[in-house]
Amino acid sequence: MFPNSSNLGRPPFPPKHQQPSNFFNKLPLNIPPTLLSHQQIIDAQFNFQNAALSRALLSGNLATLPAVTPQPLTYGNGSPVHTSAAPTSFRGRKRLSEQNVPYGVKRQRFHSPHRETTVVNQTVPLPEERRYSFPGSIPSQLFHARYVPDLTGCVPPLRDASFSDPVETTLPVAKDKLSQQVLELFQACQQQTSDLNRKELCRTELQREIQRIFPQSRLFLVGSSLNGFGTRSSDGDLCLVVKEEPVNQKTEARHILSLVQKLFSTKLSSYIERPQLIRAKVPIVKFRDKVSCVEFDLNVNNVVGIRNTFLLRTYAYIENRVRPLVLVVKKWASFHDINDASRGTLSSYSLVLMVLHYLQTLPEPILPSLQKNYPDSFDPTMQLHLVHQAPCTIPPYLSKNGSSLGDLLIGFFKYYATEFDWSHQMISVREAKAIPRPDGIEWRNKFICVEEPFDGTNTARAVHEKQKFDIIKDEFMKSWQILRDKKDLNCILPLRTTIQKR
């Protein structure tokens, strides 16, 4: 049911005899191998010369942390990154995958009966076998991939011993122009297996290097890359987990990230570009990976991101209208400049929760509250190494609501333009309804309140200026009125331009 989950949602774990602590040491024995031969890499190259850094960090005594001495580059023989075709060159922020893949190849999914699908431990190669590799990497299935049969939107389940073979799922049928436009935009812009594999390759290699400093750490791919709502242009989000206990984001996390930034800017400078430490409420290191040609944000111990990745992933795949609707809303918000939390508007995460909330609150709901219906599967105290397995037993949701994608999109804009009470209500996917705002400081005098399903914080806290809030409300109102009258997506989102940008 969840493509790539066992591969990409869970990093590798060294065997028990290599673990001085019991951090993540209760893994099931039947987990299949991951994309790359992680264990071989770790066994062969695990380096404990900087283990004192990790011990000092885990003990909470930052003062004892020794200085990091940059080591020689150890990716293979240290030679530059190479590809099977032309050398990599960086030309601004535009992704290499968009620059070098011929237009006809990028468009092949419209003219070919075979789309990129995947089964766990089988990966789909890039067009014309164009795939980057790290010199000296241990050979793996990533470099001996083959196409798998198209199953018309199939979403394979985890390939654990307790799970059955993949089941077939289909995209919704579009019987009107607006619904067809939504579906075509989704098919053109949704993240492909090859996009995900590039991010996973980067995560694998970075984890190996970071474990030289923090041997018991794990690096998780989270966010839109894995939750089912990614696009071809989605950046990558990484969560570095260094210990089971919470990490002080103002002190410990910043210190850890400063070490990571130093590692990236010295030893890994041939592969990592522009590493920058951002001292936000949840600090991150922003960087560009020259190998995957993806921009990444890396945080420390923001484990709620791991939990909500698989909650959202479950919502994405239990009803086949959810992903197309979310993607078109994200593209619409980006086009209208209201999808940037760093500029005081809505984050993509908040937009996804807003779409899910709308689908939960229809007179005939299209989505349930997964946390209410399956509390054990989404227990906020569940150990992290089990989180990726939880959604696999949840069946598709059978809604009696037969609304088309076009009608749902119009209804989404109408709901937030005319029905939702921004001043007194909070959006709650956990409760599957709009609930009164709490009286805490997190919610008082806030323009938009969207509850994070696990930790209860406000994911829309970035909207702190009335001017920005008024712009957001105005865009909902105008788009609803235009779409209601015209029923043409081009009137609020130019499809040709959006598809070209991916």
Image (spheres, rainbow, N blue to C red):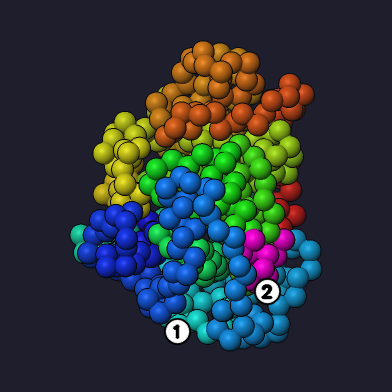
134 inside magenta stretch: no
Residue 448 position in % (x across, y down): 61, 24
Residue drawn at (28%, 35%) of the image: 375
Residue 142 position in % (x across, y down): 46, 77
**Residue 210 visible in the current orientation:** yes
Q: Is residue 477 above or below residue 269?
A: above
Range covered by the magenta-colored residues = 262-274
Of residue 91 and residue 14, the one placed in the foreground of this image is 14
Residue drawn at (48%, 32%) of the image: 452
Judge the density around disc 2: few (<14), some (14-19), many (≥20) Cα neighbours within 10 Å.
Answer: some
Of residue 29 and residue 494, the one placed in the foreground of this image is 29
Q: Is residue 428 left or right of residue 477?
A: left
Residue 236 position in % (x across, y down): 58, 56
Which numbered disc, 2 or 1, marks the residue closer to the eye? 2
Residue type, numbered disc 2: Ser
**Residue 121 visible in the current orientation:** no
Residue type, numbered disc 1: Pro
Residue 89 position in % (x across, y down): 75, 75
Q: Is residue 138 left or right of residue 130?
A: left
